[in-house]
Image (cartoon, grey):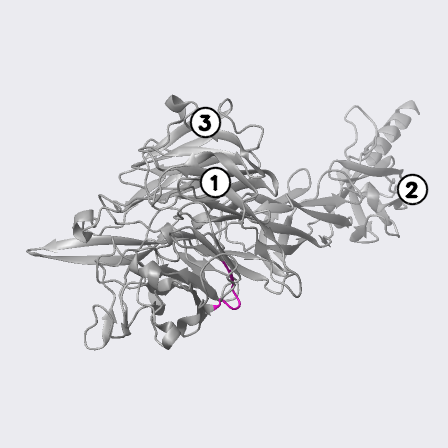
Amino acid sequence: MRWFFSSFTISVCALLAGCGSGGPNLQSATTLTSSASYALVGSAPSITLTSAVTGAATAGSIPKVAPTGSVIFSAGTTTLGSASLSGASPVSITVSAAQFPLGQDSVHAVYSGDSNFVGSTSAAVAIQVQTTTTTTLAASPDSIQQGQAGYLIASVARSAGTGAAGGSVTFSQSGSPLGTATVDGSGTAALALSTAQLPLATYPVSANYAGDAGDLPSASAAASFTITPAIDVLTQRNNSARNGMQATETALTLANVNASTFGKVFSFATDGYVFAQPLYISNYLMSDGKLHNVLIVATAAGSVYAFDADNNNPAAGFLWHISVLAAGEQPVGSGDVVCNDTNPYTSIIGTPVVDRTRGIIYLVGRSKMASGNSTAFYQRIHALNVADGSEKLNGPTVITASVPGSGDGSVNGVVTFNALTQHQRAALVEASGSVWITWASHCDNPTYHGWTIGYNANDVSQQTGVYNNTPNGSDGGIWMTAGGISADNLGHLFTAAGNGTFDVNTSGSDYGDTVQRLDISATGIAPGDWFAPSDQAYLADNDLDFGTVTPLLFDDPGSITPHLLATADKPGNVYLLNRDALGSYDSGSHGPNSLNGDIQDFPTPGTLFNSFGYFNQRLYVGSGQSAFMAYNYNPGTATTAGFLDTTPSMSTTHVFGAIWSTGGMQPVFSANGTADAIVWGLDLSGNNGILFAFDANNLATELFNSTTNQSRDQAPAAVKFTHPVVANGRVYVGGQSQVAVYGLLP
């Protein structure tokens, strides 16, 4: 009986696979089903996971034994819960969406096994679990100076779950995509803004998060950023009104501009005299792939340099340097034009103009090519790439022009532009889609006329306008002591012509000694309005040019004459004109309060060869052999015109040197809005210039002059008609073969 019992026990154990030291050896099978394949966190219902575990069939007639133990439900490494088996029935758990990892989950049921059955794992069941997101957008900074770095920053926040959302964000401006950025581990996506090509404006922007496996898409509320004027000097005297104002200066103040904390910090060497005003472009992406503050310097020898304005230049000493001379050509010399006015060379004299949006420097270069016993002379307009100095926009283009007329140099009723005798002295201006250029003479050597010629700013091979102010006479050069053509925003250019034939008052077509308004249209430019003083003939006969000062434009919005212009003549008379009705021929007696044609004219203590400045309702005037002065402007009313006081309200104690072309001071201003207003200028009467800085609201307060610590602060050897350039904490002074740079001392 004992033997029989033992045999029975062994048989049953074998059948049940549960006896003996070998452990379980029956296979199990685990299945898994889910009540849903998608769940959104925070949204009902929950998900029910159901698992069934079955054992392998057993032999003979003994009943099959059901697996016992527990089933663990998991999604990846996350345990969702467990359930104990009871007989052959499936087991279930109910799980909220928040318990799942976010994303595309592979869910398994794992049976751990028991004494009879080995464990088993179900096939994966795919369940996607997502959460809602919130996307916020901000511009950093929200006010960006043109050319400076800026960013759009989107933050994507999950409403549930841990970790950061993945995927990408698309940024748009007024519905047009700007770019896409990847969301990083902190839930942030950032898009760098290229602001150099963006016009000044406020730009509405949005961010759209695309979502990913665990995160629903979301869109930001509207945001915006504003492009404000950069700390740039892109044209002569800062703007086309020619007022000399730089109102974005924050580094230089009334407190720190003095000989103890301010002085010459370095200089840039050039291959020729710097008659053209240097131009400043802030935060510009150059060909080395880096942002630089860039100083553009053109020389009379025909070179153009791009310097890092803060002296962070490579070993060559500049970012790039090119010559505008073609192969085999030479710069035009003073001997060629029989005039030492810009000795020794006269290749680039007029100040270029920069279009930051296009990334182009426009300038006129002069050259000559000798061939045997003959020499050909050329003037060309160039369009140089700011980034590397290469020629762009179909440049360079040889400048040619002709107009009908019987004036000096005419042949068969046509006056043709003369590339040798015409002196490109005044600064260029960009207006109404064109670059405009004017010409005068070298030492009044014939033949010459006052030409104004335009070229398409998108394609400098296309001429857009030609005008000659003395087609049936002579002279009328537009030189304006190297000032620039002025322009308003209504499609008007303003020029001032010196001595020349004048007969427009008797129905002629010659405008010597006049201020002209030239109107721009689709077909070119044409005379729109003009003014000439009553003593025009006397001024012309005695080489006392009217129009020595570039027309300065300013506005008086509440006045019956809201659009104003100020200019001068060599003897030192100031003229205040109404831009909307310049006044034609002033037939009355010349002198203070004559009010014949102009609004006002009055004398100053000295000669005038310097452009005016305008700031805080004051006209700043630098007469030769005189103190530098400011005249208050008294605004007009709806029925009366405004006027200037004829006695200065303040003046410097320093008297500026010579009477004629190197006398007086051309002012430029720096201020932070209207705070810390400083007026800067040069005394050019000696061999070397002297840099001055005065409190613009109290000219008797001299803040700085470069002779106080002359060994450190010596200004360059002087050239005619120059003035400082102020930008971003630096003051740049051009001279003979160098640019001196002043700033706060280290």
Percent across and percent down for residue 428 are 39, 56
Element class at badge 3: strand
Q: Amino acid at mark 2?
A: Gly
Residue displayed at 25% across by 56% down: 444
Element class at badge 2: loop
Query: Which of disc 3 and disc 1 is earlier in sequence?
Result: 3
700 above or below 616? above
**Camera sees residue 105:** no
Percent across and percent down for residue 656 are 41, 37
Residue displayed at 40% across by 52% down: 483
Q: Residues within 10 Å of mark 1 (few under 14, many from 20)?
A: many
Is residue 473 rendered magenta in the image?
no
Is residue 581 rendered magenta in the image?
yes
Q: Amino acid at mark 1?
A: Phe
**Could you say which is closer to the camera, residue 647 or residue 575?**
647
Q: Is residue 175 left or right of residue 722?
A: right
Element class at badge 1: strand
Magenta range = 576-583
Percent across and percent down for residue 696 are 55, 39
Query: Which of disc 3 and disc 2 is earlier in sequence?
Result: 2
